[in-house]
Image (spheres, helix red, strand yellow):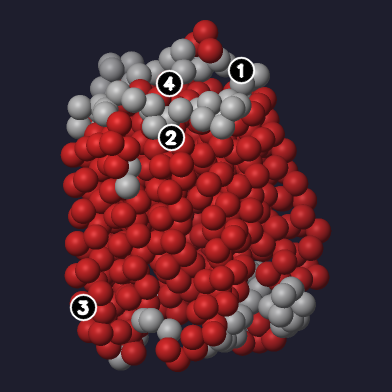
């Protein structure tokens, strides 16, 4: 059977039917909705589950350790995308990667829903990390695949897709945050049900709506390569198992050691990825130029996500410990603040999608949009300093300050994240399409690997310094990116 071209795959899919977009966007929208429902529902209560006392239904870990583990977990979730991207590009295609990933995520949440010890907790983390690595980058790649090249609807399509992500992220913390008052495990069970519903919808609608999109393996392994891959994978797993069997009983494997290792890998892996793709004979000179342009965008993305992802760590603890949760006459669950980010995106994403389409040729360049994202992210941290200055360091803070902080970072996210997804599909070398999407998510992995090292520095005594330095650094980097944007654009258009 001859291999189908990208255009032939796109033409095999109905091109309109979901808000003027390909029907496949419906399938991908709701698949990602339920996956994000399960992920954000679990994430909204996970840090509390770790540091709440055992008598309160938690694991009883120290707060600094819980914050670091939360960041490392988030980093590994996005880092595993390189495995999912490689498997999709070389072994079984993006559609199967999405399905297999969803199954693993579901079983991970089931493991969390079973009351047990910390060993069961880490088993669930492994399942969710691998599953999300298979699903998340590949479902985004399929979005890019259902549009023809240079389709003007692509940016708007990713913004609509982004709404699906955040609709699930908005609803889940409200439900799970209330359930955690009864039982953390009940909340995790609801997350498992959400992933199951997403899998059912994907299987039922993918053939009709996606057609051949996601079924092609862009750069398949040859029979010899596949044989070697299976052999070396088995050998590698056996070696790792043998090493751990020796090191763990000796006490040589510690949580602090894992945190440090992931911090190094968070920077090292994307660096290796850039070098390998740039030097590959399958990457054309034009694609090499675009990869160079992608590097400053990647660095800006790391800075942005380093701030945004602290919404589930530093700001989550801030909501739990430093915020007046009875400010409106009833008790607010600290997990409910995790719904603010997706709520604002649901409201504003259509506005941004309309704005980018309306501007047409007057659109700010991709680097300029990224610079705006950094400016808003920096401001979101600086506003946290205000209530402390006004009311003193020990006073409980009005929750509206946290609302404002989440609102500002969402303005930055809508300037950077959907634009970054669309830019990744456009700038990706043809032979590394899914893997380049994995590289985009590695910017989040790198950010959270860095966060795992720095969240421990946030204490009541260092709060002002912490928010001020990180917020100020983001604003400075945003200004620099704005100034060098024309040069980056020349590399994109080369």
Residue depicted at 20% across the width and 32% down the height:
462
Query: Is 469 located above or below residue 292 in the figure?
Result: above
Q: Residue 241: which quarter of the image?
A: top left
Label of residue 484 in the image: 3
Pair 1/4: label in front: 4
Within 10 Å of disc 4 (Cα), the crowding (few <14, some 14-19, many 20+) is: many
User: What kind of element bears circle 2?
Assistant: loop
Q: Mark 2 points at which residue?
A: 398
Q: Are marks 1 and 4 in contact (CB under 8 Å)?
A: no
Residue depicted at 64% across the width and 49% down the height:
168
User: What kind of element bears circle 1?
Assistant: loop
Q: Which of marks 1 and 2 is nearer the N terminus?
A: 1
Give 25 or 205, whichever is nearer the viewer: 25
Q: Mark 1 points at which residue?
A: 115
Residue depicted at 67% across the width and 62% down the height:
29
Pair 4/2: label in front: 2
- The Cα–Cα distance between marks 3 and 1, rounded to whole angstroms, is 53 Å
């Amino acid at each position: 059977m001859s291999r189908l071209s990208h255009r032939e795959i796109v033409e095999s899919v109905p091109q309109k039917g979901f808000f003027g977009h390909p029907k496949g966007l419906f399938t991908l929208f709701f698949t990602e909705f339920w996956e994000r429902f399960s992920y954000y529902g679990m994430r909204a209560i996970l840090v509390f589950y770790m540091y709440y006392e055992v008598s309160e239904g938690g694991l009883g870990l120290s707060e600094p350790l819980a914050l670091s583990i939360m960041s490392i977990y988030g980093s590994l979730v996005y880092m595993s995308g390189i495995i999912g991207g490689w498997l999709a590009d070389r072994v079984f295609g993006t559609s199967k990667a999405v399905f297999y990933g969803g199954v693993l995520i579901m079983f991970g949440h089931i493991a969390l829903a079973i009351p047990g010890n910390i060993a069961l907790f880490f088993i669930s983390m492994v399942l969710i990390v691998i599953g999300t690595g298979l699903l998340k980058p590949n479902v985004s790649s399929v979005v890019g695949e259902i549009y023809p090249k240079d389709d003007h609807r692509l940016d708007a399509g990713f913004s609509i897709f982004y709404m699906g992500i955040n609709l699930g992220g908005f609803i889940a913390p409200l439900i799970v945050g209330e359930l955690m008052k009864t039982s953390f495990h009940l909340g995790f069970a609801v997350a498992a049900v959400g992933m199951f519903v997403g899998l059912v919808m994907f299987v039922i609608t993918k053939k009709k709506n996606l057609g051949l999109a996601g079924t092609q393996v862009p750069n398949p392994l040859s029979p010899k390569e596949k044989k070697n891959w299976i052999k070396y994978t088995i050998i590698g797993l056996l070696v790792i198992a043998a090493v751990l069997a020796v090191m763990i009983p000796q006490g040589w494997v510690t949580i602090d050691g894992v945190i440090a290792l992931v911090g190094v890998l968070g920077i090292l892996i994307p660096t290796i990825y850039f070098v390998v793709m740039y030097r590959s004979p399958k990457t054309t000179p034009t694609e090499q130029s675009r990869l160079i342009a992608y590097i400053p965008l990647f660095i800006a993305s790391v800075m942005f996500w380093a701030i945004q992802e602290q919404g589930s760590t530093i700001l989550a603890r801030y909501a739990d410990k430093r915020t007046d949760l009875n400010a409106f006459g009833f008790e607010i669950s600290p997990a409910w603040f995790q719904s603010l980010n997706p709520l604002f995106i649901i409201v504003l994403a259509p506005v941004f999608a309309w704005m980018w389409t309306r501007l047409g040729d007057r659109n700010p360049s991709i680097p300029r949009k990224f610079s705006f994202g950094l400016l808003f992210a920096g401001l979101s941290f600086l506003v946290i300093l205000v209530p402390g200055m006004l009311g003193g360091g020990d006073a409980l803070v009005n929750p509206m300050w946290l609302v404002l902080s989440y609102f500002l970072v969402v303005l930055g996210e809508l300037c950077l994240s959907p634009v970054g997804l669309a830019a990744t599909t456009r700038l990706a070398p043809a032979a590394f399409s899914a893997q380049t999407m994995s590289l985009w998510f590695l910017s989040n992995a790198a950010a959270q690997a860095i966060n795992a090292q720095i969240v421990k520095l946030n204490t009541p005594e260092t709060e002002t310094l912490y928010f001020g330095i990180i917020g100020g650094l983001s604003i400075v980097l945003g200004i620099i990116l704005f100034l060098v944007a024309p040069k980056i654009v020349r590399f994109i258009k080369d």
